[in-house]
Amino acid sequence: MTKQPLVVAEGVRKVYPKGVEALRGVSFEAYPGELVAVRGRSGSGKTTLLNMIGGLDRPDEGRVEVAGRTVTELPEAALLELRRDMIGFVFQSFGLIPVLSAAENVGVPLRLTRAAVAEREERVRMLLTLVGLGDHMNQRPYELSGGQQQRVAIARSLANRPRLLIADEPTGQLDSHTALQIMQLLQALVRSEGVTALVATHDPKLITLADRVLELHDGAIMQETAA
């Protein structure tokens, strides 16, 4: 049986004001259990592409499909549901809520879906243990290192068991040693959780951990290779 792609992008084009062409007909596929690195210089279109895949922005032309649903045709309410139930996001800035503990931050998506308290607490405990922070559940972001905060963010992104994980420069604020640990964690989670991960990065050491690399240049894929 042929393996079906989880993500399909066909001819995705995005033009910003003053004629800036951020994406120029990008097409690719990503499969379940695959870690795909999106590589390119600043301004190459990495973030724009990830935003299109995650339904955070809409292309001017082309089609994006996630898990059989055409993201580019969904109304806003359906997009919100898709992002809540199917997609986990990890950002460079961590995006944690300062007044909440690590456990409470991870539990936010589960509260939004009104998961039962016992189920929520068990899922939070399991995820923080999975990312190596089982002993830091009650600490707030300011009490954690940058690497630990990003681990909390990754745990939060997995709370609702997404099928797709989108990480935009998740190691951009971290030192090289911690960045490598975070990328290795993402690689391990792809294997253990069976998710598809799209990770934007420009770090050559991190790219070697990917299954496949998409090289973006001026809004177009110039090269697609196995890492």
Image: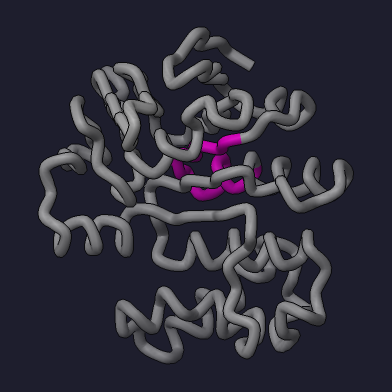
- x, y percent for residue 91: 57, 54
Residue 1 visible at all: no
Residue at coordinates 63% horizontally, 60% vertically from top-left? Answer: 93
| Left or right of 139, for residue 226 | left
Q: Which image quarter: residue 97?
A: bottom right
Q: Which image quarter: residue 147?
A: bottom right
Relative to residue 92, is residue 42 depicted above or below?
above
Relative to residue 66, is residue 117 depicted above or below?
below
Residue at coordinates 57% horizontally, 29% vertically from top-left? Answer: 37
Residue at coordinates 64% horizontally, 16% vertically from top-left? Answer: 227
- x, y percent for residue 190: 55, 42
- Region of the chain picked out in magenta, as a range: 188-200
Relative to residue 29, is residue 55 depicted above or below?
below
| Left or right of 167, for residue 172 | right
Please check the rendered image and state whether residue 193 is part of the magenta-colored stretch, yes or no.
yes
* Chosen colour scheme: one colour
| Left or right of 61, for residue 128 | right
Q: Which image quarter: residue 133?
A: bottom right
Q: Nearer the viewer, residue 67 or 121?
A: 67
Q: How many marks?
A: 0
Please check the rendered image and state whether residue 172 is part of the magenta-colored stretch, yes or no.
no
Relative to residue 157, is residue 6 depicted above or below?
above
| Left or right of 64, for residue 217 | right
- x, y percent for residue 68: 18, 38
Residue 10 visible at all: yes
- x, y percent for residue 137: 70, 82
